[in-house]
Each structure stands twice: as structure tokens, then as C-alpha cells.
Amino acid sequence: MADPIRIVVTGGAGFIGSHVVDALIERGNVVGIVDSLVTGNRENLNPRAEFFEVDICDAEALAGVLASFKPQVVDHHAAQISVALSSRDPAADALTNVVGSLQVLEASRAAGVEHLVFASTGGALYGDPEVVPADEATPIAPLSPYGAAKASVETYLRMYHDTYGFSYTALRYANVFGPRQTPEGEAGVVAIFTNRMLKGETPVIFGDGDQQRDFVYVGDVAQANVEAIERRLQGAYNVGTGVASSVNEVTRELTNACGFEGIVEYAEERPGEVRRVTLDAAKLTRETGWQWQVGLAEGLALTVGHQKARANRPG
Ligand SMILES: NC(=O)c1ccc[n+]([C@@H]2O[C@H](COP(=O)([O-])OP(=O)(O)OC[C@H]3O[C@@H](n4cnc5c(N)ncnc54)[C@H](O)[C@@H]3O)[C@@H](O)[C@H]2O)c1
């Protein structure tokens, strides 16, 4: 096994970040977590990681963590993840997702960090692409302030690379789903519907349910982070399955997995919603051998199983 790497994961108490932490520790690395716990959960914290309860917008505290922990790599997942909130209050979204990310970049540069991984988005960056699955050359055309903020950080990263020789990977995720996801965020439909169906409540589909998404399992996303860090991948990489699934299909699969017997309601489509996007991850596969392993039905069964176990836990 390779030498252990010292890695700080921001957002490591959240859904995706905590799975990334688990995968990195499993590989024998030494991991620190920076998280303000604004949406993250202490229960997600890997006990073998060192935890720093710090807001990424607090430049001084962040610099202190990096100076003491001395990471070689920063894996940046902390973010405001609600697309709807970003539309209501773009400035608040930008404070965390643009300014906070810049604090992470600056603190990393000052601390001599060798490589940074950024949790970007394919789902929100490409808008409604003409060609699907969309590859990394697809024009950037976000339909929400959340997507615009992610695009902006990618621009800064390219500039840091060209001007300072800063090494980075921007991982452009499809709709990530799996255990520990909270009912907000880009792929919230799985978390929200699982939650509602297990409680016997009516799930509501916005629009006709035929909108198509690329659902990628969180364990596969964590593995993409491992590849990005170990190989110091440079630039933007899609992380998705290329498989289109409609919200109606996901609802049917979840109905089976949850044993739900109620009805599903339909409501008016929300503005700014992407109609159809799937991602082509051939570049990541070609350069690292990464392949997604867990398909939609299997992943949904794992998610429902986890949610049931959580609901049945005493206390
Ligand atoms: N879920 C998806 O489908 C998806 C798709 C594309 C990209 N992403 C990106 O992946 C990353 C993780 O998303 P997630 O779905 O796991 O969300 P999450 O809300 O579960 O995780 C975000 C974590 O960041 C922390 N955080 C938020 N603001 C912070 C701040 N100012 N300082 C310190 N910590 C802060 C939260 O407490 C939380 O633990 C985000 O950058 C998100 O934009 C997610």
C-alpha cells in the first residue's frame, strides 16, 4: 500500500463528504474534517478522523487548522447545497459557495497544500445540454445561482492553476444518492421520497415526472475522490453513470423498496429545473479505470435499508 496521505476534507460531516472520509481512511490515510455542522451531522463523523468545528468563511480559523494539521491534500465538499435557496438568495449562496471556497483555496495555497479536490456539479453546470450524456467539453450554462457559483469556483481554480501552478481536480458529480443524504440538495428526491414513503406520507412530484437525471451512488463518488487524490488528476472530470432515469422511474423503484402503498401526487414544475441531463464519465474511466459499481435499484435498496435501520434505532 502507498504511503499514507494527510488530507483535510471540508464538509466531512455531511452526506458525500463523510463517505469520502470513510473511503480515504479505509485506504490508510490520515484525515482531518473541517465542518461547521450547519447541515452536517456528528453521527456521520468517522471516529478515526480528527474533527475541527470550523466555518470555511472564517479565514483565520481555517488557516489555523491547515497550519496545525499540515495536509498534503484538501478535499473541498463544504457548501450550501440547496438549489432552491440559491435562487431565493443568490448572495447568501455565493457567500459560502464562492467566498468560502476562495478562503479554502487561499488557505490551501498559504499552507503549501499540494493538491485540491473540488466537489463541483455536472447536473447544475451544463444546464439543459443539447447532447447527452454530456462530456467535459459541454458548454457551461448553469440555470441556477448554485450552478453559477460552482462554475465560478472552477474558473478560479483554472486561474490558480495557470497563475500559481496550483494542482486541482474538479469532480463534476451527477445526482448523488445513498445513505446519510438529507432531504435537501440536488438529488433530494431520493432522500425526500424515502423519508415520506417510510412514514406513509404522500410524495409530491414537481412536473410530469419525466424529467431525466443521472443517479450515481455515493460509494462510487467516494471512490472517484480516492482516484483524484492518489493520481493527482488535473482539471475537470465528470462523475456519473450516463444512465438516464426519470423521476417517475425512481418513484416506482422506491415504492417497491419501501413497500409503499399510498398514492403519489403531482404539482406544478419548478422554475429553473433541468429537463434532461446525464454525464459521460469516459475521461475518468480512461485515465483511472474508475467504473460505477452500484446501479439505481441496488443503491435505492441500500438507501432504504439504511433509513429503516436509522428510524428503528432507539433514542
Ligand atoms: N448531493 C448531490 O447530488 C451533489 C451533486 C453535485 C455536487 N454536490 C456537492 O457535493 C458537496 C457535498 O454535498 P452533500 O450533498 O454531501 O451536502 P451536505 O449538506 O450533506 O454536506 C455539506 C457539508 O458542508 C458543511 N458546511 C456547509 N457550509 C459550511 C461552512 N460554511 N463551513 C464549514 N462547513 C460547512 C455542512 O455542515 C455539511 O456537513 C457540496 O459541495 C455539493 O455542492 C452534491
Image: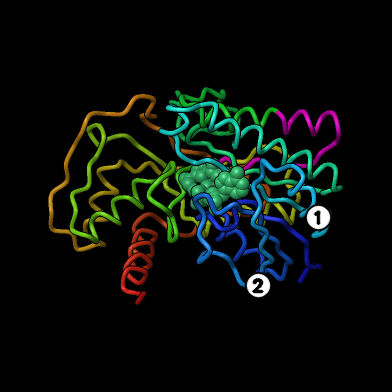
Q: Is residue 177 left or right of residue 63?
A: left
Q: Position of residue 149 (x, y in %)?
A: 58, 29
Q: Is mark 2 within 8 Å of ligand 1?
A: no
Q: How many marks?
A: 2
Name the quadrant of the C terminus: bottom left
How far from the left and from the top, in percent, is residue 64?
79, 52
Q: Secondary structure at mark 1?
A: loop
Residue placed most toward the observer, 106 or 74: 106
The tag on residue 244 is none
Please name the residue shown 55% across and 54% down the image.
37
Up the image or down, 240 lies above or below 298; here it is above
Q: Nearer the viewer, residue 35 or 126?
A: 35
Give the image location of residue 207, x and y in percent: 25, 31
- Between 40 and 298, which is closer to the camera in this rendering? 40
The residue stretch that appears in magenta:
156-173
- Disc 1 C-beta below 8 A from ligand 1: no
Which residue is nearer to you in this view: 85 or 174? Answer: 85
Q: Which residue is mark 1?
A: 72
109 to 46, vertically: above or below:
above
Identify the residue at image location x=49%, y=41%: 81
Disc 2 to disc 1, how far (Cα)? 18 Å
Q: Residue 48: which disc?
A: 2
Q: Is residue 161 magenta?
A: yes
Split into 4 quadrants, where in the image is the N terminus? bottom right
Apparent side of residue 212 relative to residue 146 in the rendered image (left or right): left
Q: Secondary structure at mark 2?
A: loop
Name the N-terminal-most of marks 2 and 1: 2
